Image (cartoon, rainbow, N blue to C red):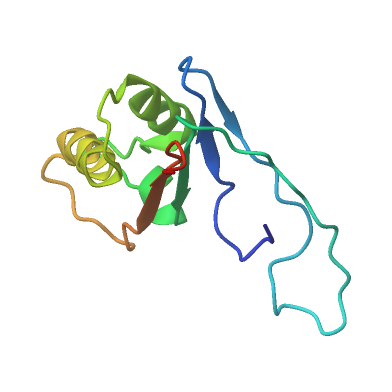
Amino acid sequence: MANAGLIAPLLRHPDGTVEWLDVLGLPLGMVEETHYMELHYLLFPGDLVLLSTDGIVEARNTSGEMYGFDRLAECVTAATCQKAEMVQDWILQDLRAFVGSAEVHDDLTMVVVIVREPHD
């Protein structure tokens, strides 16, 4: 992983615990000849990784309240879906319910990856 200027990836384990994967350093391409520390995470079957832009956590409702990191983590924890596309839909439904009729001012981009058992 490397910092590309996005929010940290969110990792949900099969037991429901979540953790933000701290990606250190400046975003890629900001400064020439910057050295980056390599980070390695071992993923296991059932692990879910969410990559998203800041538009998700910074989305605001009509009261000006942000969706936020905690609400996103709670939403991902509550998702019982077994397919990545369904988890993505779950998050978007929760986000849209929170935002309501407020105008969205940023992109809502995310990638959901669920690690599966290897097939023989």
Q: Residue drawn at (44%, 44%), measured in percent from left and top?
A: 120
Q: Position of residue 60 (x, y in %)?
A: 31, 43
Residue 82: x %, y % from top left: 27, 31
Residue 84 pos. (x, y %): 30, 43
Residue 117 location, x and y as percent? 45, 36
Q: Which of 119 and 107 lies nearest the eye of the viewer?
A: 119
79 shown above or below 88: above
Which quadrant would residue 61 be assigned to in this image?
top left
Identify the residue at horizontal 19%, vertical 55% (top origin): 103
- 72 or 79, which lies in front? 79
Quadrant occupied by the N terminus: bottom right
The image quadrant of residue 91 is top left
How many badges with numbers are in the image?
0
Q: Residue at image x 70%, y 80%? A: 29
Establish if 107 lies above or below 71: below
Given the current orientation, which residue lies at the most extreme left position?
101
* Residue 22 appears left or right of 99: right
Q: Residue at x 85, y 58 (%)?
A: 37
